[in-house]
Image: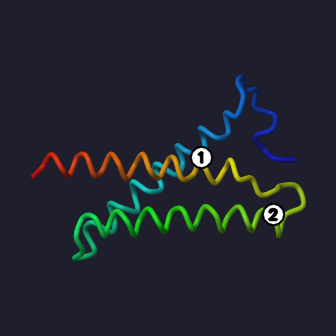
Amino acid sequence: MNRFESVPVKGENVDKYVHATFYFVFTFFWFGYIKYKRALSLNKQLLYVFTGAVLYGILMEICQGLFTNDRSADLKDVVANTSGSAIAILLFWLINRQKK
């Protein structure tokens, strides 16, 4: 049994908002690391971080489907993960665009 199944949550697909939030934070910190460790253009940094986050999310869903008995791969989770990462990337792009 999943630890969070007993937590009362109202609304449909609330877990998708959680996925999006986690991937927003994940992308935020990953971009922060890449920004200060790499000498790449902003657009390349954003592209690499976004691509990496999306591929990681897809890999995790595939692993859930293949290697667990109580969980399954869910395309909606991939969409939610990608949405969270995309929002973080857009926010970074807007902030850095205004600094010029």
Q: Position of residue 90 (x, y in %)?
A: 35, 48
At numbered mark 1, what does the secondary structure look like: helix, strand or loop? helix
Verify CB contact (< 8 Å) between mark 1 and mark 2. Answer: no
Lateral position of residue 70 relative to residue 10, left or right: right
Q: Which mark is residue 35?
A: none
| Residue under the image location 25 percent in, 46 percent down | 94
Going by the picture, which residue comes out furthest to the bottom?
39
Image coords of residue 72 (percent x, y): 82, 56
- Cα gap from disc 1 to disc 2, whole angstroms: 17 Å
In terms of depth relative to the viewer, which is nearer, 3 or 88? 88
Q: Residues within 10 Å of mark 2 (few under 14, many from 20)?
A: some
Mark 1 packing: few (<14 Cα in 10 Å), some, or many (20+)? Answer: many
- Residue 29: x percent and y percent? 39, 57
Identify the residue at horizontal 58%, vertical 66% (top origin).
56
**Location of residue 33 (image quadrant):** bottom left
Q: Is residue 98 left or right of residue 72?
A: left
Q: Residue furthest left?
A: 100
Q: Quadrant of residue 30?
A: bottom left
Place of residue 12 in the rendered image (x, y in percent of width and height, measured from the top left): 72, 28
What residue is rendered at 70% in x and 53% in y?
75
Q: Mark 2 belongs to which amino acid?
A: Gly
Classify residue 30 as left or right of residue 71.
left
Secondary element at image label 2: helix
Q: Which residue is depicted at the point 32% across and 60% down?
A: 32
Number of callouts: 2
- Specify the amino acid type for callout 1: Ala
**Furthest-top residue in view?**
10
- Location of residue 3 by image quarter: top right
Marked residue nearer the N-terminal end (1 or 2) = 2
Query: Residue 80, which numbered label?
Result: 1
Residue on which disc 2 sits = 65
Q: Is residue 46 left or right of residue 99?
A: right
